[in-house]
Image (cartoon, helix red, strand yellow):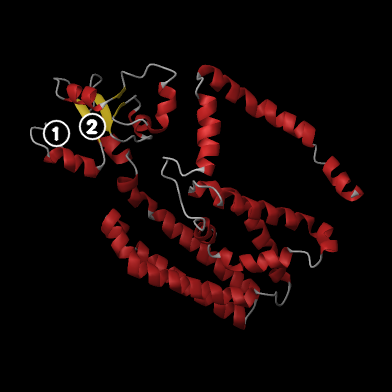
Amino acid sequence: LLGEWEILKTMYLPSGLVLYAIIAAPWHVLMSQASPEFARFYFVHEHFQRYLTRGDHGLFRQSWFYIPVVLGGAFPWTVFLVQAVKNNLPSSWRQRHQHRDALFLILWAGLSFLFFSASSSKVVPYILPLFPPLAILIGSYLSAGWDKADVAGIRLGYWVLLIASLVLVAVGLKVGPHYLERYFDPAKFGSVPYAVSSILVLGPLATLILGLRLDFRRAFISLTLTSVLLIAVANSSLASLNHECSVKDLANVLKSRLQPEDEVATYHTYYQDLPVYLLRRITVAGWKGELGPGMQSEDVSSWIVDDTTFWHRWNSSSTIYMLTPRSLYDELRAKPNQNIYL
């Protein structure tokens, strides 16, 4: 107990908490003064209610949601995750002090994973704090293989890597084309799916052969090259998603023809990046979302409007550009006497 107390004394808990409050508290206090509804919305709705209830924010996911996120987010290195945790754990309770750093990393990753998995609302970025400790644990495990002839679990990791990669390729070839055709234009991706499939087959196969027949160092180099190539090829395809996943292309076309007196509106939705690309405030029609709490603190009646107000402006002599999801656009075009021009 005396040793544990000495560790606690070096953590500067009281002064650390005070320093944290000095840095973080002023912004929250000023926001609460400027907007009386901020504190309730931010702390109660956005934290406690979002964590404990499904609510109306549409972020509910199953409890296992983060398992594929973690395994896929650090792939291919996660094939060594189980071995890394096992290798860093103390063999007995008495040896815990010799493995203090490893236990800290395991608790950091494990408790964070359990905490966010228990939440009723799950978004991929929530789980990002897990990756630094996992990277250190896996890196520590692999560094042992650099100096030793063989490390427990390394060969099993090679096989798991190959099997997991083949499964990913098989699932991707079966489901991938249907998904691309449904949500994106497959032609924009070109040969990227085939390049990714080739890397997922040849890279793990080369890693397995080098690891079993030669040594870990050559296998590690092969695995590193596989990871780098996967990231490079995947990154090269991201620009193809701009048209479907970002409003930037539409905003650039719109910006070239906008006049100062023209109005831009989003209908029954809100694109958060649109005002940034257009460098102007836009009208939001028939939608509140996370803008709702701020509406109680200031007069937004000129730019957050209901359907009646919006259609009155739309049918006036002024020029209004409306952005809305394709499904709503099709519904509006199907209505008679609706003056809509694409």
Q: Is residue 325 visible?
A: yes
Task: Of the two numbered discs 2 and 1 on the same chain, state the one appearing first in sequence.
Answer: 2
Q: Could you tell me residue 114's position as x and y percent?
A: 60, 53
At 44% from the left edge and 46% from the top edge, which residue is drawn? 59
Q: Nearer the viewer, residue 241 or 233?
A: 241
Quadrant hosting residue 182: bottom left
Residue located at (55% from left, 17% from top) = 33
Picture residue at 35% right of the left edge, 32% below the top:
277
Quarter of the image with the C terminus is top left
> Given the current orientation, which residue lies at the most extreme bottom position?
213
| Vertical placement of residue 182 versus 21, above or below | below
Helix, strand or loop for disc 1: loop
- Crowding around mark 2 (Cα neighbors within 10 Å: few <14, some 14 to 19, many 20+) is some
Q: Secondary structure at mark 2?
A: strand
Q: Is residue 184 among what the camera can see?
A: no
Query: Which amino acid type is marked by label 2?
Result: Met
Gap in angstroms between the C-alphas marked 2 and 1? 9 Å
Q: x%, y% of residue 20?
A: 69, 31
Mark 1 surroundings: few (<14), some (14-19) or many (≥20) residues within 10 A = few
Mark 1: which amino acid?
Ile
The answer to whether residue 287 is left or right of residue 224 is left
Evaluate if marks 2 and 1 touch, with contact meaning CB atoms under 8 Å apart: yes
Q: Where residue 35 appears, x then y in whole percent?
A: 50, 20
Residue named by callout 1: 340
Q: Tag on residue 118?
A: none
Looking at the picture, how far across and down is residue 173, in whole percent? 35, 69
**Residue drawn where x is 51% and y is 25% of the image:** 38
Q: Which residue is mark 2?
A: 322
